[in-house]
């Protein structure tokens, strides 16, 4: 029976130390650290290895549940897999310990709240984008070529005074950028 810690940050510019310190205070026998986005399971190979290597009566300890998974579905899948194998899950920040009935209840409650918060953020983002579109603002990168630039390139290309590569160079963009600008736009 061992307490095994897992600490994850999303980018290399972030620091594990806060999580590692908390896991050490919790007396984890072993701590695995990882840098990778929680959005894709493939971005967390250390977690996969850790989960496979754990044995019955071990307990996986995390600083916060969002360091382990990014969705309620994934979190409950990991928890159910660990539980089926006789492995506990403990979150220090949320004070959850799934080795107890109360801990399992609180775990499921916090998991639902976390998903609710993510859903609200997604709704607000969609509403904000729709409001911006209604005001004529579109997201994404600023176009490198104006409509006048594209018209000029078409004149050069139709008159065969320049190749596409030459026209792109004259406009200060790459050939692929010019080719995309020359394509007919799909109306949405």
Image: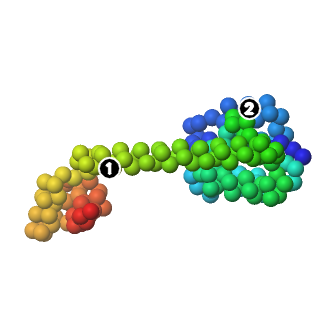
Nearer the observer, 169 or 79: 79
Q: Horizontally, is 61 left or right of 120 in the view?
A: right
Provide residue 59's location: percent of width, then percent of height.
Answer: 82, 46
**Left or right, 116 with reference to 186:** right
* Residue 45 as seen in the image, left or right of residue 23: left
Q: Which percent across, then down, holds residue 150?
A: 17, 58
Q: Is residue 68 visible?
A: no
Sequence order check: which comes first, mark 2 or mark 1? 2
Check contact, mark 2 vs mark 1: CB within 8 A: no
- In this orientation, which residue lies closer to the viewer: 31 or 121? 121
Q: Position of residue 79 (x, y in %)?
A: 73, 53
Q: Residue at x 54, y 46 (%)?
A: 116
The quarter of the rendered structure image containing the C terminus is bottom left
* Residue 95 visible, this angle: yes
Residue beneath the point at 66% across and 52% down: 75
**Badge 2 density bin: few <14, some 14–19, many ≥20, Cα 10 Å:** some
Indicate left or right for 157 with 71 as reference. left
Horizontal and vertical percent for residue 133? 28, 49
Mark drawn on residue 22: 2
Q: Quadrant of residue 45?
A: bottom right
SS for tag 1? helix
């Amino acid at each position: 029976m061992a307490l095994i810690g897992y600490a994850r940050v999303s980018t290399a510019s972030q620091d594990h130390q806060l999580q590692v310190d908390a896991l050490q205070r919790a007396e984890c026998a072993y701590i695995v650290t990882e840098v990778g986005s929680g959005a894709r399971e493939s971005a967390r190979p250390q977690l996969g290895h850790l989960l496979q290597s754990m044995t019955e009566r071990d307990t996986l300890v995390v600083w916060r549940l969002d360091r382990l998974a990014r969705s309620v579905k994934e979190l409950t899948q990991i928890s159910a897999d660990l539980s089926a194998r006789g492995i506990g899950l403990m979150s220090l920040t949320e004070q959850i310990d799934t080795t107890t009935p109360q801990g399992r209840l609180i775990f499921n409650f916090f998991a639902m709240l976390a998903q609710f918060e993510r859903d609200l953020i997604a709704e607000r983002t969609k509403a904000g984008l729709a409001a911006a579109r209604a005001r004529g603002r579109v997201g994404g990168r600023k176009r490198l070529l104006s409509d006048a630039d594209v018209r000029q390139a078409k004149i050069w290309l139709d008159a065969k005074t320049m190749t596409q590569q030459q026209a792109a160079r004259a406009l200060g963009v790459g050939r692929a950028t010019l080719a995309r600008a020359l394509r007919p736009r799909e109306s949405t």
